[in-house]
Image (cartoon, rainbow, N blue to C red):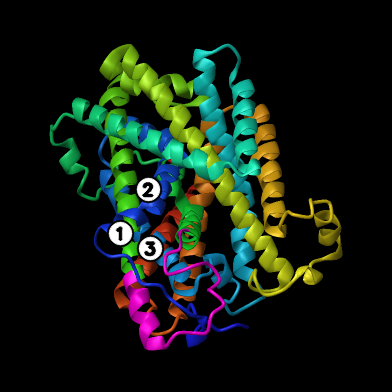
Amino acid sequence: MTSDTRDDVLRPSVPQPPSGRQRLKWWGPGLLWAMSAVGSGSVLFTPRIGSVYGYSLLWLLLGVAALMWVMIREAGRYAVVTGRTLLDGFSTLPGPRNWALWVVFLPQLVAAVAGVGGLSALVGSTIAQELPGDLVLWSLVVLAMTTLVVVSGGYPWVSRVALVLALGLVGVMIAAAFGVFEADGDAVAGLVPSIPGDLDIAFILPWIGTILAGSMGIIWYSYWAARRGYGGPMHGSGTAPEPLDERVPRLKNWLRTMSNTAAIGVMTGTLTITAFLVLGAELLGPEGIVPQGTDVANDLTRLLSDVWGPVGHWLMVAAIVIALGGSVLANQDGWSRSFADIVLILWRGGRRAQADEKSFPAWANRMLALRPSHMSVDRALRIVFAVTVTCLVPAIVVVIVRDPVAIMSVSGIIATLHTPLIVFATLAVNRRLPEGVRPGLTFTGLLAVAGLFYSVFAVLYFANLLGAFAN
């Protein structure tokens, strides 16, 4: 089994880290992650939480956000230090061969179907509210269009446009929340940890799982950090190794830049999600409205129409279509890349860059022989997963279920139950990094706390299934 405690796991060379205003150019992955995180289900579930529980779970939202910063920061650490993705690191863990990859892969196949299907159904229901056609029709249109963008390679430039528009709409949501917020003491009380007497574990679990992207969002941040070039290019530069005493100080500076970027992403996402909690508590709660079923879009558009009338209605429609449509793209791209990498590592029996196609199963080589000669294996696999797992299968689910809340709830529950496994695997990988760039006691402890926190909710969920909380 490969050990990552050797110094040769470090990048062979490390460029000078940015300084001063140059750091501003490296905030992109944080903002991109924030937008995908907000749209991953928080827009759907947070107003529901605000409507039912008011501000009594505000402390939980802020606590999860703080833990999420720790989790994505540590996920990015491995990419910065090694030039490889976190999934490469998972393949080096002791135990049965590639066990951690299978632990990630199988549950996330279900989460991907439910996540993309639920998001597209929510966007489809919003469009159907304004144009001829039903939820199913527009959901399928959304899936077809976003899949075409991902498969054609147009995701990078489309995501940049969607990011700019989504940031503007985030400002609108925050302004609306300030406009309706009433400082009556409930919000302040919500900062103090307390458990509502009527707490429904099954109701809040999907929300916890989708606050700031959830389990797979942790891995995606390591992808964005690696592909953006934090610490240098992916998989090293192929040059002779620089002296260790030169590489380690530079890597520490890169880690600080990555950590600040993660903090910006978490703060942006948390502000936005808090705004939705305020709108749900102030507008939906007093009227007893809990967004659900096929009419969920109609309930959500009231968040702004009750504030600014018709203008607010159309702003909310735009927010759902642009922000969540962008999230469909981000989820399709993120999951297809992750699944393609996992399969490559599994087929090659180790890290994705170590072997050639001769190590692939015979059936895989026959399938890959159908791709154009200029297309890489990695890209071919991404297209296969984008078309099947994040388009065709979600489309079938939408046609059968039709309820965005029910579909997304499955993804949120999987995310909550799955997060402890990903967190503890990340902790194990990072603790095997060389001294000087491995996490210290503080972040080791905080990451362990994050894993235990989600483990508690996993236990509570299964206890609830067994009737432990029945009246």
- Left or right, 217 with respect to 316, comes to right
Mark 2 vs 3, N-terminal side: 2
Q: Secondary structure at mark 1?
A: helix
**Classed neighbour count for the residue bearing mark 1: other residues with Cα under 10 Å, few (<14), some (14–19), many (≥20):** some
**Residue type indicated by callout 1:** Arg
**Numbered tag placed on residue 287 in the rendering:** none
Mark 3 vs 1, N-terminal side: 1
**Residue type indicated by callout 3:** Arg
Mark 1 vs 2, N-terminal side: 1
**Classed neighbour count for the residue bearing mark 3: other residues with Cα under 10 Å, few (<14), some (14–19), many (≥20):** many
Q: Secondary structure at mark 2?
A: helix
Residue under the point 60% across and 14% down: 133
Position of residue 151 relative to residue 64, above or below, is: above
Q: Position of residue 68 (x, y in %)?
A: 37, 56
- Residue 255 in the magenta stretch? The answer is no
Q: Determine which residue is flagged by label 1.
A: 23
- Residue 229 in the magenta stretch? The answer is yes
Q: Position of residue 257 (x, y in %)?
A: 32, 64
Q: Nearer the viewer, mark 1 or mark 2?
A: 1
**Would you say the residues marked 1 and 2 are in contact, meaning their CB atoms lie under 8 Å apart?**
no
Q: Secondary structure at mark 3?
A: helix
Q: Which residues are magenta?
A: 228-253
Q: Determine which residue is flagged by label 2.
A: 31
Residue 300 visible in image: no
Q: Determine which residue is flagged by label 3.
A: 73
Q: Position of residue 381 (x, y in %)?
A: 70, 54
